[in-house]
Image (cartoon, rainbow, N blue to C red):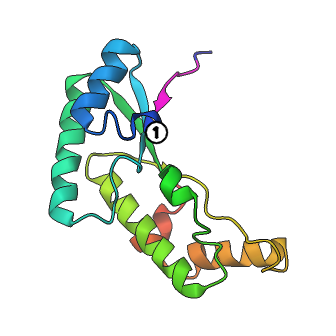
Amino acid sequence: MTIPFGVNLSFCVKRWVTPGLWAKLVREELGVDLVQFSYDLIDPTWPDDLLSELARELREATAAHSLTVHSAFVGLAHYTYNQLLHPDDRVRDVAEEWLGRAYRFAALPGIARVGGPSGLSPHGSMAGRRTKSRRLITATSSRACCGWPRSRIGTA
């Protein structure tokens, strides 16, 4: 059995921030051909025209260096907040919008998977696992989550 070996690009933050920089580093210096993109490198809330250009650059750099992008990680910045498990509906709505934009960006260069922690339940603010489960179920099944049709949720 062969186990694929790759690298998460979170280590590139602030130093190798463009696809041309990190693609060359990963392929030529690390000798790796499989990567997990990190949203610490590109914020999906940036303007659409910029995201389109960055997606093109990502596609071209990975092709030029024979890299496969396995998936996109929400990143450490997004991970620091409570997101879909925040007690305030408005914060959960913002988190859902962010995730929707993350999914849309990932689709532009052909990244098939987006993942990361869904949030964190604040201590003392919820009645345990049942509330957490209800919030996650609401976020993913009561409507098309993050702008994606239900048929795509959990299938990437």
11, above or below 77, in the image: above
Q: How many marks?
A: 1
Left or right: 54 with respect to 146? left
Residue pushed farthest bottom? 89
Residues in magenta? 3-8
Q: Which of these two is toward me, 147 or 126?
A: 126
Say which residue label 1 marks.
Answer: 10
Majority secondary structure of magenta residues: loop
**Residue 76 in view of the camera:** yes
Residue at x-position 58% and y-position 20%:
3
Q: Give coordinates of residue 91: x percent, y percent.
A: 54, 80
Inspect the image, locate mark 1, and give the three-letter code of the amino acid beneath it: Ser
Residue at x-position 24% and y-position 40%:
58
Q: Give coordinates of residue 23: x percent, y percent.
A: 29, 27
* Residue 4 colored in magenta in the image: yes
Residue at x-position 82% and y-position 71%:
129
Quarter-of-image position of residue 59: top left
Left or right: 109 with respect to 124? left
Q: Give coordinates of residue 133: x percent, y percent.
A: 74, 72
Q: Which of these two is toward me, 123 or 111?
A: 123
> Mark 1 falls on what kind of element?
helix
Left or right: 141 with respect to 129? left
107, above or below 140, in the image: above
